[in-house]
Image (cartoon, rainbow, N blue to C red):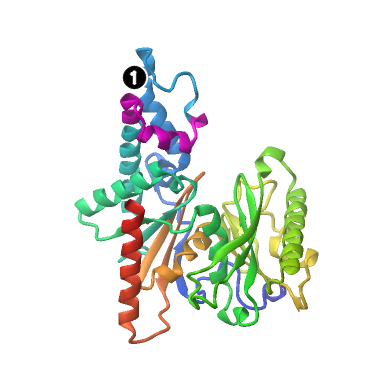
Amino acid sequence: MSEDVITTTGIAQHGATRLPSVDVDSFNIELKDEEGFIGDRASKGAFRRIFERWRKPLRRSGEDPFGDKASEEISKKALDEILVGDDTEASAVVHSAIEEFAQELAYVTRRFLKTKAWAKTECIVVGGGFRASRLGELAIARCEIILKDEGFEVDLEPIRYHPDDAGLIGALHLAPSWIFEAHDSILAVDIGGTNIRCGVVETGAKKAPDLSKAAVWKSDLWRHADDEPTREGAVKRLVKMLKGLIEKAQAEGLKLAPFIGIACPGVIDADGSIEKGAQNLPGNWESSKFNLPTSLIEAIPTIGDHDTAVLMHNDGVVQGLSEVPFMQGVERWGVLTIGTGLGNARFTNRHKENGKKDKADDKSEDRKAAKKKSKD
């Protein structure tokens, strides 16, 4: 196993608990109650079920303002427009669904906060596809109010970057800082149960050494759920996407680091295998005979003039890592990602600047200002 780790990274273990900027206190916790996994109560599908339930009384009376369209087929954008539209009945249905979902999210968050791993959490950022909507932002804000009313001193904030970008930008914080001294960008991969997204992430380190100005320069998306590929077919397509991005970055003159950061569902072992939690990916990714980092090294052995290093971690962890520059005003913080399931991770900052409390306070004020701007 140790040989595999060195072969695929040479810089750190996959799924590591200690990263350059944070310690990962926990990730991918699967809490249960009498109904099953509690994450299922605050997923994207859970909101749709709640929304459908609030439509039923109107449907029985023949007055459903949404007509015959199935609840899961109504887009987040359409629901956002209804919130501010003239149809008060339709808006009331959406608001009712948001309120009930916020109550469920508060229940789930409460359960996490009561675990040992999440003790003394000061702030939680909420990402995932559901966050990328006004209704998601309202649910997050309402959840925060519910928790504070119950005495939980914790801030809840929508993740700063668009969730699609956050899952790529977070990969920067898997890499050791020295790798950015001669390079201005990296390759990042975000693997999900529906899509695989690859991107070139610019560090923005010249503008902000803390990587707070990082941005996705170019990305490529493949909705693999539509194609239902084999596992080997999925890896082959992923390699093709990465090679295409390498060519574009080099043609543009970017100084691409020989590093690929991967966000992947499940529990990631030190050798790059997936212990559990990859059941929604194409084929059997939990097989002892499959190792994605090794497959990528074999297909892309070098980037530029250097050997390629690949580092993989849980997707919730990586999305949360995109917030590292903006969480320096707190010590302990977490992330919840609302998507097909509920991703989760808890972090403790590894403070590098002892005694520089004023800078941490400035970061805290910046975070509060950004939160207020989001609400406005």
Q: Magenta region: which residues? A: 72-93
Q: Is residue 295 visible?
A: no
Q: Please give the name of the residue rendered at 70% of the width and 46% of the height, measured from the top-left corner.
A: 283
Asked if residue 30 lies left or right of residue 244, the reply is left
Q: Please give the name of the residue rendered at 35% of the width and 18% of the height, measured from the top-left corner.
A: 58
Where in the figure is residue 104, as x and y percent of width and height?
34, 42
Picture quarter containing residue 177? bottom right
Q: Is residue 75 magenta?
A: yes
Q: Please give the name of the residue rendered at 54% of the width and 78% of the height, measured from the top-left corner.
A: 206
- Is residue 214 positioned above or below 50 on the image? below
Picture quarter containing residue 230? top right
Asked if residue 250 lies left or right of residue 136, the reply is right
- Is residue 305 positioned above or below 226 on the image? below
- Is residue 343 positioned above or below 8 on the image? above
Residue lying at the far bottom of the rendered structure: 355
Magenta stretch, main secondary structure, is helix
Residue on which disc 1 sits: 57
- Is residue 266 positioned above or below 17 on the image? above
